[in-house]
Image (spheres, rainbow, N blue to C red):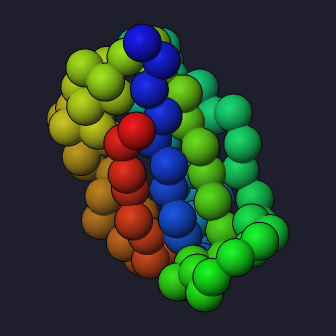
Amino acid sequence: MTSLVIVDLTVLDKTKLAEYSAQAGETLIPYNGRFIAKGAAETLHGEPEHVMKAVIEFPDKESAKNWYFSAAYQALIPLREQGIRSCFQLV
């Protein structure tokens, strides 16, 4: 079953975010992941902690977890932490 990684984020440094995003996108390829949405989120109800979202689609939960915990992606986390404050959730 298709699974989604939903990323809630707040930008801390646009330059670091751009650097991270370029590299992170490449790490999705071996796991058949792809961005299906990203950008400012319109709040319909409630008080969000973050104002932006990214949604990444994977063929299944195993692929999503294998991507997130892969050495290639884990190596980018320090750069990610410089560029954004975030929360990643798997659905």
The image quadrant where one finds the N terminus is top left
Q: Where is residue 42 in the image (x, y as percent from the top left)?
A: 80, 69
* Displayed quadrant of residue 3: top left
Does residue 13 appear in the picture of this structure? no
The answer to whether residue 87 is seen in the rendering is: yes
Q: In this view, does 65 lie above or below 17?
A: above
Residue at 63 percent across and 60 percent down: it is 53
Q: Where is residue 33 in the image (x, y as percent from the top left)?
A: 50, 22
Residue 56 image point, x, y percent? 55, 36
For the point 50% across and 56% down, which residue is it? 7
In the image, taking residue 52 as reference, residue 43 lies left or right, namely right
Task: Name the side, left or right, on which 51 lies relative to 8.
Answer: right
In the image, 25 versus 41, the foreground residue is 41
The quarter of the displayed image where residue 82 is located: bottom left
**Which residue is located at x 77 percent, y 71 percent?**
44
**Which residue is drawn at the image coordinates 63% and 82% (left, top)?**
46
Q: State the image coordinates of residue 68 (x, y, percent, origin top left).
A: 29, 38
Number of numbered markers: 0
Residue lying at the far front in this picture: please name it.
45
Vertical arrangement, residue 63 with respect to residue 50, above or below = above
Q: In which quarter of the image is the C terminus?
A: top left
Camera-nearest residue between 51 and 21? 51
